[in-house]
Each structure stands twice: as structure tokens, then as C-alpha cells.
Image (cartoon, rainbow, N blue to C red):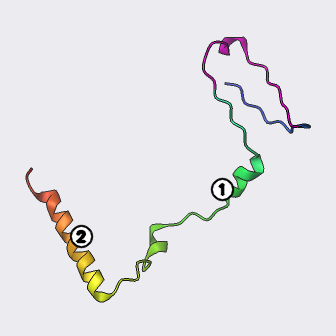
Amino acid sequence: MVRTVITPEKQDVSIHIPESYIGRQIEVLLYAIDELNDQDNVKKKKPSDFRGSLKLTDEQYADFQTHLKDIRNEWDRDI
């Protein structure tokens, strides 16, 4: 594997392919490192962050819980 970081001086970049890679499929990735770092800084959400997000009425909540109970009971049935 060959990995390198460059700072291009112009829009075109030429790469040298090692002889052992000729005739083989290779993958070439191009991304700006600072863009990758920006993605890492995005706050990761936890399941608890979504608590209360549905904003269900009491009737909708009861219906939802009944549905959950029904589908969980299906796990125990013989197929």
C-alpha cells in the first residue's frame, strides 16, 4: 500500500504507480484533510438525545406501546 499526503501547487497532479500494481485494480481517494477533520468535529448523538422527540399524544403513545408489545410477543411464538 502506498499512502502519501501532498499539497498541490496546480489543478493537475500526476502519480507514479508501483510496478507491482500494474494490471491490478487500485483505488484512488481524493479529499481535503481539513474537510475530514470538520466531519469528525460534528457532535455524535446518543440514543438518549432522542428522548421525547416523537411528541406523541397520550392516545398515540398507548397505541405505540401496544404495537411494540404485539411485535415483541411475536418473537416468542413458534414458527
From which residue to which does the magenta span run?
Answer: 11-26
Say whether residue 14 is magenta. yes
Q: Residue placed farthest to the bottom in the image? A: 58
Up/down of 31 relative to 72, above or below = above
- Quarter of the rendering containing residue 42: bottom right
* Circle 1 Cα neighbour tier, 10 Å, few/some/many (<14 / 14–19 / ≥20): few
What amino acid is labelled 2 in the image? Leu
Residue 3 or residue 64, whichever sits in front = 64
Residue 26: x and y in percent read: 63, 24
Image quadrant holding the N terminus, namely top right
First in residue order: circle 1 vs circle 2: 1
From the viewer's perspective, is the residue at label 1 or at label 2 nearer? Answer: 2
Say whether residue 71 is magenta. no
- What residue is at 22 percent from the left and 71 percent from the top? 67
64 to the left or right of 73:
right
Give the number of the disc on residue 40. 1
- What residue is at 66 percent from the left and 15 percent from the top? 21
- Quarter of the rendering containing residue 19: top right
15 to the left or right of 72:
right
Up/down of 77 relative to 17, above or below = below
Identify the residue position indicated by label 2 in the image.
68
- The secondary structure that most of the magenta stretch takes on is loop
What amino acid is labelled 1 in the image? Asp
Which SS class for mark 2?
helix
Q: CA distance from mark 1 to mark 2?
A: 35 Å
Residue 7: x and y in percent read: 86, 39
Residue 14: x and y in percent read: 82, 25
